[in-house]
Image: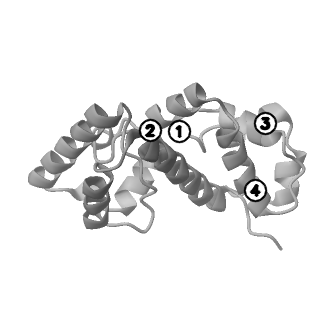
Amino acid sequence: MAYSLEAVNALSQDEFVDVFGDIAEHSPWVAEKAAAYRPYASRGDVIDSFAKGMNGADEGAQLALIRAHPDLAGKAARAGQVAEASRNEQAGAGLDQLTDEEFQRFTELNDAYKARFGFPFILAVKGATKHIILEAFEKRLQNSAQEEFAEALTQIARIFRFRLEDAVLPDE
């Protein structure tokens, strides 16, 4: 169900977190922070408030948010043990239809990425294909830890955008 901007602004703090708490993967604190920026003048303001909430958090909270994301095409995703939004996003990129060999390649890259950086590879996969994702994996494995931390937050903000565009009606 998509909400009008008027309905979003009318939600109590608890209702807002109930409705939007899953926008940030298993991290309702982001919605709590985003609610503080109400009232919103546009859907873009809603989206920006989630990014501001995330970016204004301390590094420990940001790292916990990054670590809350599932591996792309990981075992949990294959078993259906990820949030519905993640499952739908990964399916949209074809990650639910990988061959055994492709699944093995994703597993190797996920493991190498986590060993190098200490958190999962995050990419806003809406509009991407498995080939684009694999290419991004290999390229980003060359980055520094600082670059990848920043890139993970950038990708999470993109995920917020996609999810909120589905949850909040466009401006009239």
Q: What amino acid is found at the position of numbered circle 4 in the picture?
A: Tyr
Q: Position of residue 51 (x, y in %)?
A: 67, 48
Of the image marks 4 and 3, the number of the one nearer the N terminus: 4
Query: In the displayed structure, does residue 67 sit left or right of residue 27?
Result: left
Q: Position of residue 152 (x, y in %)?
A: 47, 46
Q: Which mark is residue 69?
A: 2
Q: Residues within 10 Å of mark 3 (few under 14, many from 20)?
A: few
Q: Position of residue 106 (x, y in %)?
A: 21, 48
Q: Which mark is residue 13?
A: none
Q: CA distance from mark 4 to mark 3?
A: 12 Å
Marks 1/4 in contact by CB < 8 Å: the verdict is no
Q: Nearer the viewer, mark 2 or mark 3?
A: 2
Of the image marks 2 and 3, the number of the one nearer the N terminus: 3
Residue drawn at (38%, 66%) of the image: 128
| Mark 1 lies on residue | 25
Q: Nearer the viewer, mark 4 or mark 2?
A: 2
Q: Residues within 10 Å of mark 2 (few under 14, many from 20)?
A: many
Marks 4/3 in contact by CB < 8 Å: the verdict is no
Q: Nearer the viewer, mark 3 or mark 1?
A: 1
Identify the image quadrant of the N terminus.
Answer: bottom right
Q: Residues within 10 Å of mark 4 (few under 14, many from 20)?
A: some
Q: What amino acid is found at the position of numbered circle 2 in the picture?
A: His
Marks 1/2 in contact by CB < 8 Å: the verdict is yes
Q: What amino acid is found at the position of numbered circle 1 in the picture?
A: Glu
Residue drawn at (23%, 36%) of the image: 111
Q: Identify the image quadrant of residue 14.
A: top right
Q: Secondary structure at mark 2?
A: loop
Q: CA distance from mark 3 to mark 1?
A: 18 Å
| Mark 4 lies on residue | 3
Query: In the displayed structure, does residue 149 sit left or right of residue 3?
Result: left
Of the image marks 4 and 2, the number of the one nearer the N terminus: 4
Height in image: 114 above or below 37?
A: above
